[in-house]
Image: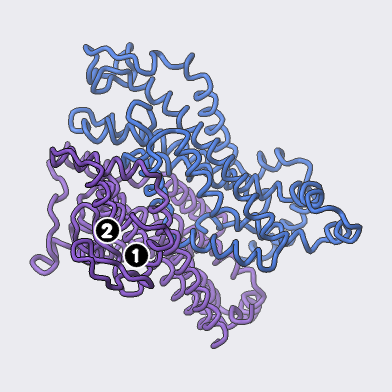
Amino acid sequence: MSQLREALPQEVARKRRSASGDFFVRLARDKRLGVVGGVIFFTIVLLAVFADFVAPYGMDEMRIMDRFAAPSAEHLLGGDQVGRDILTRLIYGARISMVVGLAGTSITVVVASIIGVPSAFFGGKYDITVQRFVDAFLAFPGLLILLTVLSIVGPGILQIVLVLGILTGIYSSRIVRSAVIGIKENDYFLAAEAIGSPTYKTIMRHIMPNIMPQLIIIFSITIGGIILDEAALSFLGFGLPPEIPSWGGMLSWEGRRHMEVKPELALYPGLCLAVVILGVNMFGDAMRDLLDPRLRGSEAS
Amino acid sequence: MRQYLIRRLLLVVVTLFMVSTLVFLSIRLIPGDIVDSLIAELQRSSGTYLGTLDREALERLWGIDVPIYVQYGRWMGVLPRPDPVTGEESFSGIFQGSLGASLKLGAPVTDMIRGRMAVTFELGLMAIAIACLIALPVGIYSAIRQDTVGDYVGRIIAIIGLSTPNFWLAMMVMLYPALYLGWSPPVALISFREDPMGNLMQFLIPAAILGTSLSAMIMRMTRTMMLEVLRQDYIRTAWSKGLKERVVVTRHALKNALIPVVTIVGATLPIMIGGAVIMENIFALPGMGRLMTNSLLQRDYTVVSGVNLVFATAVIVANLLVDISYAYLDPRVRYR
């Protein structure tokens, strides 16, 4: 216990001293798990980008004689119910997860800023009104809104990216809002206001650059959730159409229907999901701790 | 305290109002082609052609033949709703405790939900109990032994738990015992009145899966809260008084750390409801989540909006109770 009490002031001092420069040095030194997570994440990104070259077969290439094929040199993980190579489908699944994850999270960050920044900047009645809307959204279990909206707009990558991005953006806008409220206390902000800096200029020059750490944090702690949400929605049959090899969809369309014949069909896609999300979460946690230790433990809000 | 309560209650009323408006808009803003597809489905299932006259009749039956603000008034129960057959007008909306009738079955949505509430409630309650049983001891241990092997093991297990999709875990639990032990979970709901043990056992597996995935989240937050409390001045005072570790941890730290943990459990409720939807689907439990997905597949949007509203209200009420108990336990909150 004494260790805990001694270490604290030093830790704080160390964090202050190296607050800006050697980010990667700190990542490598203090956050080994984060590095592991980052390596997993970027490997999957590369796999997704170069899927056409890495995958042994074409995405939809099927040979009916390879139906439920056992693992062999030809098919490292075997074949599925119509004779498609499972490994190939999994690699293309990485592409789907990464596209949904990265695009969805980018929209999240944009939406969170569009809602959060003006809400904190203008304050007053505008803030109260907007925050009541956010409250109302927060009251809905996320999965239920996603299901409802997706059943209306229909399945598809564009729909799922937009719906996931916007909804998560509304949830994350609280983090942006509180960051901006913190900035409004600073002297440089008061000075900008005092010299009559126009609104857009104050926001672009003084607020946006200073909430970058929070935006990066939102990006890194929500990407795992977005990938998982897409998988859950596709699993329930409301996400992506069956011809797209999404891991969640594979679990449902191929895995659930044929798991008694070939359990691997249900095993591998979930394993891929777990590994990717584990990597993304470890990386995201490290980023959050390094950029803003105060946000520790805010992952469920 | 009283002022805080009043402020908090007013906020809840506003939020509930907004939530019901959002639920209303979410289905009424559906573009017209949904009406067409509903009619097409009806034609297919009945095998007869429904002309324009029938379309008007159907729109009247579904109450979508009037401007949207009138629909809204009827839905809230401030404007009278005419009976589609007799034309008699009566008030039936949210204020009267009615959520309308199912588009497909014609049955009142409230009745459909009432019959299924118990299943979801039982699943959720068991899941939360299991989650807390795992999360609290591990989270507390992790905090008081920060940066030891035990702490790392706990944190790694938590992050693995956070990353494992619960629907996949559920599939594995369905699949592998069935393959190797010839055991699979029951398909039909076992009534609690007829076989209490069987009923509990049936819910135990989905609840355990849901509970473990929730426990990862609760555990991480418990650890954070506990660490925060351990850094407080009064803990240093307790140490310097020469108190034993057990006393410092249980009497001084735990009591203060557990208050925010109550909030955490409240905050996980929306996530738990999402998980319950998935578990009910995989384990064929006839709860509200299954009603929701079935109604979505059948495009029965009045049922969907009813379930959404009930779940959202549950979350709001739970958060209110959490906030009130928080303010009651921790006087500092009231003056914020």
**Residue B133: x and y, percent?**
36, 64
**Residue B200: x and y, percent?**
19, 63
Please report whichever mark, 2 or 1, sits nearer to the chain's N-terminal start: 2
**Is B45 placed above or below A53 here?**
below
Say what amino acid the circle numbered 1 marks. Val
Residue A120 badge: none
Residue B195 visible in this rendered orientation of the protein: yes
Say what amino acid the circle numbered 2 marks. Met
Contact (CB < 8 A) between labels 2 and 1?
A: yes
**Is B234 placed above or below A33 here?**
below
Question: How would you rate the neighbour count of disc 2 (Cα within 10 Å): few for under 14, some for 14-19, many for 20 or more?
Answer: many
Asked if residue A174 lies left or right of residue B109, the reply is right
Asked if residue B308 lies left or right of residue B5, the reply is left
* Chain to which mark 1 belongs: B
Which residue is labeled 1 in the image?
B310
Colour applied to chain B: purple
**Residue A240: x and y, percent?**
38, 34
Which residue is labeled 2 in the image?
B288
* Chain to which mark 2 belongs: B
| SS of the residue under disc 2 | helix
Give the foreground label among 2 and 1: 1
Q: Residue at x 14, y 51 (%)?
A: B186
Foreground of the two, A121 or B57: B57
Colour applied to chain A: blue
